[in-house]
Image (cartoon, helix red, strand yellow):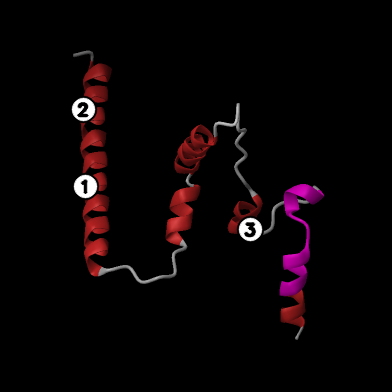
Amino acid sequence: MNSIAREARSLLKRPTWASGQSLSCNPHHHQQWRGIRVKVLNGNLERALTYMQRVMQSSGIERMIKQEQTHHIKNSEKRVLARKNLERKLRSQEFARKLQAVLVKKVRGM
């Protein structure tokens, strides 16, 4: 019973950043209260929405939302995601090798 009361109290409690307290041990708790504010200038809602989408992509909120998906992901989608992740990893490793080769040449004075 105490655990249920504790969870209810934590849900009703003000966010940690508003009360001036330090962050709780759960890092996602802070993410829950952080939001994105976008000003709508001259009633241009479409522009504000596109700006908000760019900010969400760059801040990683969109990625976090996709990770929290609870519905079924098809096997074909899993394969596509796995291939994209592998390609990203290989590109990163290739870039690291090229960068290391350039830095070695620069240090040796070639």
The three-letter code of the residue at mark 3 reads: His
Disc on the earlier residue, 3 or 2: 3
Residue receiving disc 3: 29
What is the quadrant of the N terminus in the image? bottom right
Q: Magenta stretch: give its range.
A: 7-19
Closer to the camera: disc 2 or disc 1? Answer: 1
Estimate the spatial distance between the alpha carbons at disc 2 and disc 1, rounded to whole Å.
21 Å
- As for residue 8 lying within the magenta part, the answer is yes
- Placement of 101 over or under 88, stated as above or below: above
- As for residue 100 lying within the magenta part, the answer is no
Considering the whole magenta stretch, tell me its main secondary structure.
helix
Q: Secondary structure at mark 3?
A: helix
The three-letter code of the residue at mark 2 reads: Ala
Residue occupying image coordinates x 21% and y 54%: 83
Closer to the camera: disc 3 or disc 2? Answer: 3
Residue receiving disc 1: 87
- Placement of 110 over or under 64, stated as above or below: above
Residue occupying image coordinates x 62% and y 39%: 37
Q: Secondary structure at mark 1?
A: helix
Disc on the earlier residue, 2 or 1: 1
Q: Secondary structure at mark 2?
A: helix
Q: Residues within 10 Å of mark 1 (few under 14, many from 20)?
A: few
**Residues at badges 2 and 1 in contact (C-beta under 8 Å)?**
no
Rendering coords of residue 57 (x, y %): 44, 42
Q: Is residue 65 left or right of residue 30?
A: left
Residue receiving disc 2: 101
Q: Residues within 10 Å of mark 2 (few under 14, many from 20)?
A: few
The three-letter code of the residue at mark 1 reads: Glu
